[in-house]
Amino acid sequence: MPHILLDYHSQNHIAVITLNRPEVHHAISEEMMTRLEEILDEIEGHPEVRVMILTASGATSFCAGGDLKYFMRLKTRQQARNMSLRMQSILNRFWSGERVVIAAINGQVFGGGCEILTACHFRIASSNARFSFRQAANGVITGWGGGLRLFRILGHRGLHLLLTADNVDARLALQYGFVDTIVEVEALLPAAMALASRIIQNSADAVKIFLDLYRRSHIDTEESLVEFETEAFTDLWVGKDFQKWINEYFNKKK
């Protein structure tokens, strides 16, 4: 029986998507991107689904970002750019879609995993959750659109997190405003389901309009900023610092 990279089920207007690669801390591979696209296609074909919950299996990790074995295959600027734009497209479907997206964060989150969280409308964290935007420490920047979204969520505090690559616990993330609520691990999914259930009790049209209004309040019309983030990311991808870091990482594994 093939390994299920992502589990997906829906019931009572709520869809639950579960990342399921615990052996690599649910890192995002090319295959997972394909499966995410397939799941989003399916959900978008079911208008009765009004809320999506994104979580991961286990109680240790939510997402460690991109799969490094997959990243090692991306040798050229164009390959890195294509991957960047593909994940941006996936996350834009979370952020800009018609459904409320709730992240149920069941452990540590690094790099691109934190970028995924910026595309969710609510973030509920387990008490053992930890967060680090590791990109600058690894010689690259945010490649999945998370830098701009983080600035819109946290403002100047977001710049601090990106420039320092600090490891932030759930309590501090709550203080910063990056997460909305902290619960114990065993209460995480029930808390997300409870929030989803409260949302779907209200008018579907009103919820959609509020979502759109909220997103519009965050929009910076300077499209060049998005282009700048993408171009800078792909330049740094083939730059010496990131290539040095990823090669050192794999040399340690030998």
Image (cartoon, rainbow, N blue to C red):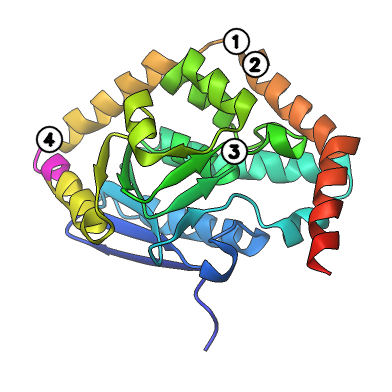
Mark 1: few, some, or many residues within 10 Å (few <14, many ≥20)? few
- On residue 222, which mark appears? 1
Q: Earlier in the sequence, mark 1 or mark 3?
A: 3
Q: Which of marks 4 and 3 is nearer the N terminus?
A: 3
Amino acid found under the numbered disc labelled 3 = Gln
Front: mark 4 or 3: 3
Element class at badge 2: helix
Left/right placement of residue 122 relative to residue 11 reads right
Q: Nearer the viewer, residue 181 or 170?
A: 170
Element class at badge 1: loop
Element class at badge 4: loop
Tell me the residue that label 3 is attached to: 88
Q: Which of marks 1 and 4 is nearer the N terminus?
A: 4
Mark 4: few, some, or many residues within 10 Å (few <14, many ≥20)? few
- Magenta stretch secondary structure, dominant: helix
Q: Which of marks 4 and 2 is nearer the N terminus?
A: 4
Q: Which residue is drawn at 77% across and 35% down?
A: 139
Tell me the residue that label 4 is attached to: 203
Left/right placement of residue 244 relative to residue 221 reads right
Q: What stretch is highlighted in magenta?
A: 198-202
Amino acid found under the numbered disc labelled 1 = Glu
Q: Disc 4 versus disc 2: distance between alpha carbons?
A: 35 Å
| Contact? badges 1 and 2 (CB < 8 Å) | yes
Where residue 118 appears, x then y in whole percent? 46, 34
| Contact? badges 1 and 3 (CB < 8 Å) | no
Where residue 183 appears, x then y in whole percent? 23, 48
- On residue 225, which mark appears? 2
Q: Nearer the viewer, residue 35 or 71?
A: 71
Q: Disc 1 versus disc 3: distance between alpha carbons?
A: 17 Å
Q: Disc 3 versus disc 2: distance between alpha carbons?
A: 14 Å
